[in-house]
Image: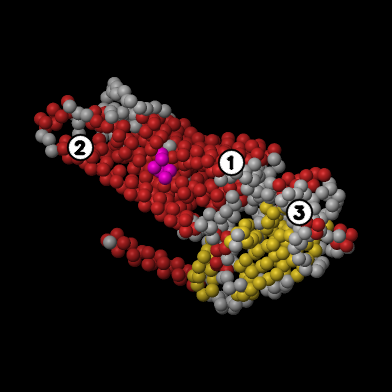
Amino acid sequence: MGFSERKTPGICSVFLLVVLFAHYSHGFYLPGSYMHTYSTSEDIYAKVNSLTSIETELPFSYYSLPYCKPLLGIKKSAENLGELLMGDQIDNSPYRFRMNVNESIYLCTTSPLNEHEVKLLKQRTHDLYQVNMILDNLPVLRIAKQNGVNIQWTGFPVGFTPPDSNDDYIINHLKFKVLVHEYEGTGVQIIGTGEEGMGVISEADQKKASGFEIVGFEVVPCSVKYDPEVMTKLHMYDGISPVNCPLELEKSQIIRERERISFTYEVEFVKSDIKWPSRWDAYLKMEGARVHWFSILNSLMVITFLAGIVFVIFLRTVRRDLTRYEELDKEAQAQMNEELSGWKLVVGDVFREPDCPKLLCVMIGDGVQITGMAAVTIVFAAFGFMSPASRGMLLTGMIVLYLFLGTAAGYAAVRLWRTLKGTSEGWRSVSWSVACFFPGIVFVILTILNFILWGSKSTGAIPISLYFILLSLWFCISVPLTLLGGFLGTRAEPIQYPVRTNQIPREIPARKYPSWLLVLGAGTLPFGTLFIELFFILSSIWLGRFYYVFGFLLIVLLLLVIVCAEVSVVLTYMHLCVEDWRWWWKAFFASGSVALYVFLYSINYLVFDLQSLSGPVSAILYLGYSMIIAIAIMLSTGTIGFITSFYFVHYLFSSVKID
């Protein structure tokens, strides 16, 4: 209680300053822009994102298909680093809405379809490609009933193939429903993230003009066969009669050569009670949420209980050994030294330099960098600073954090290097290796995948210009900061070992089973803490679902850190008890082996949950990205386990003096 009492005045002062600042600043977003209110009949233009499919995972440009183009030409929207890396390509579109004006509109009629266009449309239809449209930063939502349950998707299909039919039909008529909320200018401002507000913070600007906010964007897609001779006489944005979606295939627009396709749409504005800060709730609702919460809670309770038992038993065992030793007089201690057993026998070898010490230092440095990046990102996301409305912000934030945490990576690696070697010699090589090890692996994998995407002409391919930007960020920010961290590591005091190391290594007794078997098996316990969250994360990445339960992900991350630390410490103690002093790498992989199970689970997810994923290209992309994730998890969890084990071994052998 003393700690919280001392901190309370400071917290209150900060809170008061925030409130006063908010009062005089007319409200603000962090970061982003104000909500947009529209007056009646004001023009609003929809935007279009890349075409996406859960069948192939290869995004393509919207205008790669013969759709209507804007009168003033195609203009790309400004995109951040995360959007470009995710394959988003947001362009303007000819779809125009006028606030609170219900109308049916003609867009255009295509030229007769040629063989290439027909082939492309059929292929995109068979691969279940979705058109992703955006209005006032809201993705279009399609709602349908299946077995009495409302199922919702973002986007609408390029076309469809009826059962028992060889013909394909294109979606060429869209019935939009725009939900609007009347804003009466009460002066209430919103604070939030990206372009979405999350809560009220102040009352200011009482004179703000009233208007309408867009709080929902829904679509019903149709295929309608028009007479091209009649439609070509119309101009873009001419009015047409409202259209009922036909149920007969004869009245739908077939995809075949020489066909001319007319595109139309109608829009209906509906007043809604949904407030602007709550408009994303429809997208973030998770089906089966109850099962999701209870499964996570059950997992957390079981893992915490098991880890607690293991840790308590282990703690009592060590304390009993130390207490028993300290209670003996000097003569008895000398006699006991001759009859030592277990971990006390390896006192002269426990801090012997491990195999491949430079690689160990490099992996620990990169692990510190990745762990810091993941922790800060999840904390910010859990507190609502990374809204799904800000496309690509999560990935952009992770990259920026990773770059600037290079200092911590260089410091950790070089300090460990000095501890192992007793000298700073070679610290530049260690720092350079830290800066290039994990990014180099990612760069090689992404380059291979990028050649595959270039060959497929996908918008998911990283442009050459972005390659140069990433390389510039890598060598102009990450590398210098890592070298700076390494330099600071040379100035820090190396960790002093509590015991001396013998010149001749002690022979390790033979074992009935390989010690690595136990190390690999240890990864199952950390994996048990995260496999349920892993399912939802993989679903959000590969099935286009929104993932926004970062609060629970933060809890899972904290539990994972605890379990990794405990598992690694227990495994290290077990190896020392059987006189195996080569604990360094085993401590790393005891917790780091969870990455193996994550990768195997990813393969299981590919085989059993992504059955729709078609073709070797899609499978290679999936496995490539899964490999990057698994390597990052290995470095992060391995570092957590190693650092905990190192300080445990240091404490253990500094607690008892053996001459």
Q: Nearer the viewer, mark 2 or mark 3?
A: 3
Q: Which segment is the magenta one?
A: 523-528
Asked whether the residues under the numbered discs 3 and 1 touch, taking CB atoms below 8 Å apart as contact, a structural biologist would say: no
* Image quadrant assignment for residue 589: top left
Q: Quadrant of the N terminus?
A: bottom left
Q: Residue at x 35, y 40 (%)?
A: 567
**Depicted 623 relative to depicted 296: above or below:** above
Looking at the rendered structure, the kind of residue marked 2 is: Asp
Mark 3 packing: few (<14 Cα in 10 Å), some, or many (20+)?
many
Residue on which disc 2 sits: 321
Which residue occupies the extreme front position in the image? 164
Q: Is residue 484 visible?
A: no
What's the mark number on residue 103?
Answer: none
Mark 3 / mark 1, whichever is N-terminal:
3
Looking at the rendered structure, the kind of residue marked 1 is: Tyr
Q: Residue at x 63, y 41 (%)?
A: 618
Residue on which disc 3 sits: 170
Residue on which disc 1 sits: 622
Question: Secondary structure under badge 1?
Answer: helix
Mark 2 / mark 3, whichever is N-terminal:
3
Looking at the rendered structure, the kind of residue marked 3 is: Ile
Q: Residue at x 57, y 38 (%)?
A: 624
Residue closer to the observer: 265 or 250: 250
Residue 146 located within the stretch drawn in magenta: no
Mark 1 packing: few (<14 Cα in 10 Å), some, or many (20+)?
some
Assign the magenta stretch its main secondary structure: helix
* Image quadrant assignment for residue 352: top left
Question: Secondary structure under badge 3?
Answer: strand
**Depicted 527 relative to depicted 154: above or below:** above
Residue closer to the observer: 205 or 237: 237
